[in-house]
Structure formats: structure tokens, C-alpha cells
Amino acid sequence: MSNGDARRLFHLPQEPPLWQDAAMHALPHLALLDWLALAIYFASWAGYAWFSEHSHWRDRGLIGKGRELRLQWAYRMLERDLRIHDSNLIGNLMTSVSFYANTTIYIIAGLIAALGAADKLVSVTADLPFGGIGSQDMLELKLVLLLGSFVFAYFKFTWSLRQFNMLSILVGAARQGKAGEPGIDADAARIAGTNSLAGDDFNRGIRAYYFSLAASGWLINPVLLASLSLIILIVLYRRDYRSPLVLTLLGKT
């Protein structure tokens, strides 16, 4: 009988996974630079999420304009008797989200495999030009951060898919009519709102991908983690508020 079987048989507390135990042991040994880099990482991610979704600048960027266009789409859709084109558009959106959800599963599986082979990774990278990736405990902690970022992205993508499925149902159940007619404004608001919620979760998943790239920089050193976090923050802002696409949608080109 294995140790784990004996613990289950006698209702003894289960031992945590080796990587989890090692990661917890690594936390007290983080240098000040590591803590500072992690603070910049999480502050950049959470701060930009609040700025783009909850601040009064929200409506000036791509997210705000997208919500406005979804409402226009809902009204145009409700005027149509045949909604095949609308169903095709929703299907295209779902295909993109499904692609990212499937890809994220493979990334998560690869990171879990890397956690299981952390001791080998430490020895293999010991002679690399940047001086290796530290101790096994530190490597596992860094991989846990990377894994957590992709798990977050996976949950956002799958929830976005479920909301797009509900959007399809709403499109099928919606009545036909024009703005101002009984029930049409409520249907349009409900359809556009569901579409926006699904799109927002897709954006959150994409944002998690961006910051996962920053998290991978910690595998090399904390300075790279902090630097990539700030670079990604700037890139996201420029794309959401200063890109040619936003200027075109706002009629400023």
C-alpha cells in the first residue's frame, strides 16, 4: 500500500504536491527585486483592467466603441426577417474564442509537464548565457505564476464561449421590429449587452496572454519581468486608445 493510499484509508491529511511545497518554501527567499517586479506585474495587469473597463476613459477606447457598435448591430439584426448573416458573424466570433481556449489547454498541459520536470530543467539551463534559472524551488514558483496566468485566460475564454452560446439563443428568440416598437429596445439592449459581456471576457483572456509573456520574463530575471510588464502596459494602451483602428472608428482619421 502506497503512502497516499494509507492516508486516504485512515483519513489522514493529504500531503501537498511536491511543486506546491517547493513553491511555498521559495516565497520567504524572494529578493526585494523579485517582490518589486511582482508588484509591478500585478499592478500593471489589474490597473489596466480597471482603467479600460471601469474608469471614465473606458468609452474613449476600443472597448467603449465596440459596445456602441454592438448595440447598432442588435437594432439592425432585429429589423431583419432572415438572420443567417448574424448567425455567421456570431459563429466567426465563437471560432476565434474556441481557438484560444483550445490552445490554452495545450499550454497549461505543457507547463504542468514542466513543473514535473523542474529538476531536469534546472540542470539543463545551468550553462546558458544568462546564468541559469535559479534553484528548483524558484523555478517552480515562476512556473506557477505562468501557469496561473494561463489558467485565468482559459476560464475567461470558456466563459466567453458560454456567453456567445447564450447570444445565439437570444438572436433566435428575438422578435422582429424597429427601434421604438414594443419590446424592441429591451431586446436590443439584452442582445448587445450579452454580446459585450462575451467580448469583454474574450478581451480579458487576450490580456492574460499578453501578461503571461511578461511572466515568462521572470524565468530569466526579475528586471525582465518588470520591464516586460511596463512594455505590455504601453502596448495595450496604444492599441486600445491610440491605434489607427480606434481613430478610424472614432472618425478622427
Image (cartoon, rainbow, N blue to C red):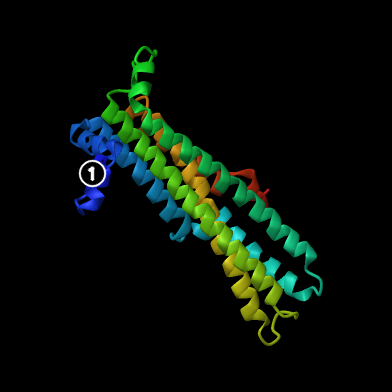
Q: Look at label 1 and name its amino acid.
A: Glu
Q: Nearer the viewer, residue 211 or 116?
A: 116
Q: Position of residue 191 (x, y in %)?
A: 63, 71
* Residue lying furthest right: 82
Q: Residue at x 73, y 74 (%)?
A: 78
Question: Badge 1 is on which residue?
Answer: 15
Vertical position of residue 155 compared to residue 186: above or below: above
Q: Position of residue 96 (x, y in %)?
A: 64, 49
Q: Is residue 242 visible?
A: no
Q: Position of residue 244 (x, y in %)?
A: 64, 44
Residue 72 lies in what quarter of the image?
bottom right
Q: At numbered mark 1, what does the secondary structure look like: helix, strand or loop?
A: loop
Q: Residue at x 25, y 31 (%)?
A: 33
Residue 75 lies in what quarter of the image?
bottom right
Q: Is residue 78 visible?
A: yes
Vertical position of residue 136 compared to residue 152: above or below: above
Q: Residue at x 37, y 32 (%)?
A: 116
* Residue lying furthest front: 1
Q: How many marks?
A: 1
Q: For this view, does 147 lie left or right of residue 242?
A: left
Q: Which corner quadrant holds the N terminus?
A: top left
Q: Position of residue 109 (x, y in %)?
A: 47, 39
